[in-house]
Image (cartoon, rainbow, N blue to C red):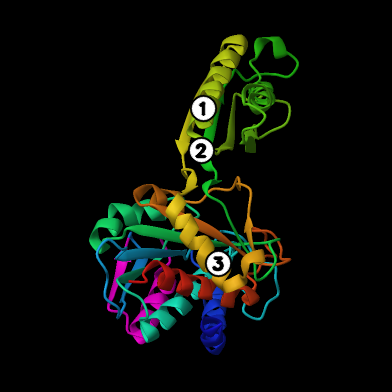
């Protein structure tokens, strides 16, 4: 296919960009070096407009096609890649491993950024489309805050974006394949924080104490029953705890305990049910034990919902690149993604690009697979040319 041939020519450059970004990872809203790198490449390509500092540390590039837009057709589409890294110590021993202590690209955002840069290079060269392609390099996806920051800065209105698209690599999905589905695609995530105030004391007199550790254990056990007993088995929900802190010395029943966890759901009504039951469990155990329990539920990512028309266009582009048999309908993923907020602001679709047999996301041994680059880059190109076809 012609696109893949040209992308093959560009591949050494795209791989070099990816590895440079990988070696210099930056956390959310601190992507100053990455943003500067992206902006410099876009200037080299000849983008029609480049805006930096958008959504704090984001970058937006505008590329105008050379074809005329017919009345009633789409005029502007947005293509989004995330740029931020994670607070993880890399354990890959790669020659281009992270040079920044305890920060690494463990989710493949280096690859996402490089593939969209590759597509921008191609699109500025050919401009074989009608209307405008807006390339969006987003900060702070891992914080669940970057998409909102860009939207609040006027991303959709300022550039007239009518549809928006996202992509994420997927370990375990073979190289050269794509996964996509219409409807709920990734979970809404809510962060749970619980602070328990009991009554500390001597372990020889437990009857005079309210044991905050025991109260925390009761909370964790009871909340596991919410998904098992209150959520319809055909629905998807997850509720887990990741931190339990209490006490700092031997021979003292601790006064306080803190729990942190998360809940993940694919439907708004299930999300509200689980939130309601978490509150009821906390209130009930507080009453039974006599402990004071403070609950905070902080919404993070919304549900990633793939709209019908953008999903059809994404499937068509993926099939053009990978072939009919290599575009799979994937089940919903219970991970969170703040692209969800962009797809709430405008109709959109989110696709998974196979990363092959790699370590899992957020693992110290993870590495984005450079063999995926021709497919992801070509997907972006074909999506623009199909969607903005005049």
- x, y percent for residue 45: 37, 85
Q: Which mark is residue 318?
A: 3
- Is 31 situated left or right of 95 in this image? left
The first of marks 3 and 2 along the sequence is 2
- Mark closer to the observer (3, 2): 3
Q: Where 322 sits versus 263, above or below?
A: below
Q: Where 262 sits versus 104, above or below?
A: above
Q: Residues within 10 Å of mark 3 (few under 14, many from 20)?
A: many
Q: Are marks 1 and 2 in contact (CB under 8 Å)?
A: yes
- Determine the secondary structure under disc 3: helix
Q: Which mark is residue 190?
A: 2
Task: Give how far apart the Cα atoms at labels 3 and 2 are.
Answer: 32 Å
Quadrant in the rendering for residue 177: bottom right
Q: Which residue is mark 1?
A: 275
Span highlighted in magenta in the image: 29-54
- Is 178 situated left or right of 74 in this image? right
Task: Give how far apart the Cα atoms at labels 1 and 2 are.
Answer: 9 Å
Task: Give how far apart the Cα atoms at labels 1 and 3 are.
Answer: 37 Å
Question: Looking at the image, which residue is at 27% across and 71% down?
Answer: 69
- Is 220 situated left or right of 63 in this image? right
Quick one: which residue is furthest to the bottom in this view? 9
């Amino acid at each position: 296919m012609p696109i893949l041939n040209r992308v093959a020519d560009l591949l050494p450059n795209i791989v070099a960009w990816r590895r440079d970004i990988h070696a210099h990872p930056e956390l959310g809203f601190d992507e100053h070096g990455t943003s500067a790198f992206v902006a410099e490449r876009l200037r080299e390509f000849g983008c029609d407009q480049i805006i930096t500092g958008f959504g704090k540390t984001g970058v937006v590039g505008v590329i105008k096609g050379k074809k005329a837009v017919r009345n009633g057709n789409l005029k502007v589409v947005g293509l989004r890649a995330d740029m931020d890294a994670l607070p993880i110590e890399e354990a890959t021993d790669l020659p281009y491993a992270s040079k920044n202590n305890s920060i690494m690209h463990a989710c493949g955002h280096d690859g996402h950024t490089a593939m969209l840069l590759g597509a921008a290079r191609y699109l500025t060269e050919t401009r074989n489309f009608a209307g405008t392609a807006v390339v969006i390099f987003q900060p702070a996806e891992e914080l669940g805050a970057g998409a909102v920051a860009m939207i609040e800065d006027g991303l959709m209105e300022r550039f007239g974006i009518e549809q928006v698209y996202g992509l994420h690599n997927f370990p375990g999905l073979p190289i050269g394949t794509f996964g996509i589905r219409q409807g709920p695609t990734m979970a809404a995530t809510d962060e749970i924080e619980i602070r328990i105030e009991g009554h500390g004391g001597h372990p020889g007199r437990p009857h005079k104490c309210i044991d905050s550790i025991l109260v925390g254990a009761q909370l964790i056990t009871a909340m596991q029953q919410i998904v098992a007993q209150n959520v319809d088995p055909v629905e998807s929900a997850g509720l887990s705890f990741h931190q339990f802190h209490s006490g700092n010395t031997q021979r003292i029943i601790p006064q306080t305990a803190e729990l942190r966890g998360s809940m993940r759901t694919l439907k708004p009504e299930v999300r509200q049910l689980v939130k309601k039951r978490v509150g009821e469990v906390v209130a009930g155990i507080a009453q039974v034990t006599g402990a004071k329990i403070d609950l905070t539920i902080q919404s993070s990512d919304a549900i990633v919902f793939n709209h019908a028309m953008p999903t059809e266009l994404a499937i068509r582009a993926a099939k053009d690149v990978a072939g009919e048999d290599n575009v799979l309908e994937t089940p919903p993923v219970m991970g969170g993604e703040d692209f969800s907020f962009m797809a709430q602001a405008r109709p959109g679709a989110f696709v998974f690009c196979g990363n092959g047999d790699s370590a899992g996301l957020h693992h110290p041994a993870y590495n984005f697979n450079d063999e995926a680059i021709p497919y992801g880059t070509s997907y972006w190109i074909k999506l623009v040319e199909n969607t903005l076809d005049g």
